[in-house]
Amino acid sequence: MQTQKPSVSLIRATSYEREALRESLVTLLEPFGGMAAFVKKGDRVLLKPNLLTGARPGKECITRAELVYAVAQMVIAVGGKPFLGDSPAFGSAKGVAVANGYLPILEELNLPIIDFHGQRYQTVSDNFNHLRLSKEAMEADVVINLPKVKSHAQLTLTLGVKNLFGCVPGKMKAWWHMEAGKDANRFAEMLVETARAINPNLTILDGIIGHEGNGPSNGEPRQLGILAAASDIFALDRAMVEILNVPPEQVPTVAASQRLGVCPELAAIEFPNLNPDLLKIEDWRLPDKLMPIDFGMPRVIKSTFKHLYTRFIKEPMSVYARN
């Protein structure tokens, strides 16, 4: 539901227990008109959690299964047809989900879970004339983005915008990490353009327990007690950096969204529940050291990757170069 001013709903929530979490989500979405404002009967609804890895269960580096369950139930209650999708950094979406305790909810709700496949989509941008994105995300009737609050060793924080990098199919992730090593700002702008292209109908951010320090997977759990929701993903990320007391210019995705004119000023955002000032975290731990986005990939590996990419993916690398 779009309003004249972007609106971000922020509440305190401390429990993943089913009934308590459902009540929290009802409160969270009430200012927008509830789930029915986003999902109509018969809609195919993509739920896009953060399914980074199955290697660190219990470290809170993926979206909690309990949150996905509660959101899926709300979608079903208004007549929608939810399915899960992601393109994890390591392993399959189902493998990562099962390793992190998703199997009971997948079986109970009969939720399909898919790995994403790519397709080229035209974009309107000064720097990108198209992006290869998940056709499943682009063709869903409704996209509900379900990120986790995390520190990130390359991008400082990963919030709503970064979570949609999961809608870039796996092989293309490797290309973008390699390409972005030349220009971190360009990588951040690509993430913003990806978010603009997918244009999630709703983002619900899992901040009950976050992941701080050397994220996205090597940090530690941190109790935050926060849930956030918005139809404007850029407004949500702007509100969250305020809560975590991190300057917007220090977070490449937020800085890029500001440069591209899609991020509202904090004063222009409505907060129908709690204001960010009431949720401020003064000692959120960022990574000890920021790493290059391309992981310092040696030249010989880059060369080999380019050869394999063009041979097996059958698309010239030049289509992703700056025009």
Image (cartoon, grey):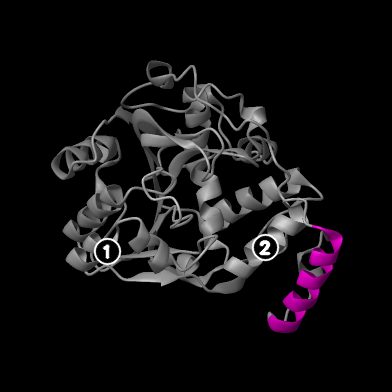
In screen coordinates, is 4 left or right of 311?
A: left
Residue ID for mark 2? 174
On the image, which quarter does residue 225 sit in? top left
Which residue corresponds to the image point at 31% horizontal and 26% vertical from the top-left?
273
Q: Compared to 193, does 169 lie above or below?
A: below
Range covered by the magenta-colored residues: 298-312
Q: Is residue 198 magenta?
A: no
Dot 2 crowding, Cα within 10 Å, few <14, some 14–19, many 20+: some
Mark 2 or mark 1, which is nearer the start of the sequence?
Answer: 1
Q: Amino acid at mark 2?
A: Ala
In the image, farthest residue toward the left: 19
The quadrant where residue 185 appears: top right
User: Can you give x and y, in whole percent of width and height, for residue 195 in the image?
Assistant: 55, 52
For residue 103, which numbered disc appears in the image?
1
Q: How many marks?
A: 2
Q: Residue at x 67, y 46 (%)?
A: 188
The relative height of residue 237 versus residue 95 in the rendered view (above or below) is: above
Residues 266 and 56: in front is 56
Q: Position of residue 69 (x, y in %)?
A: 25, 54
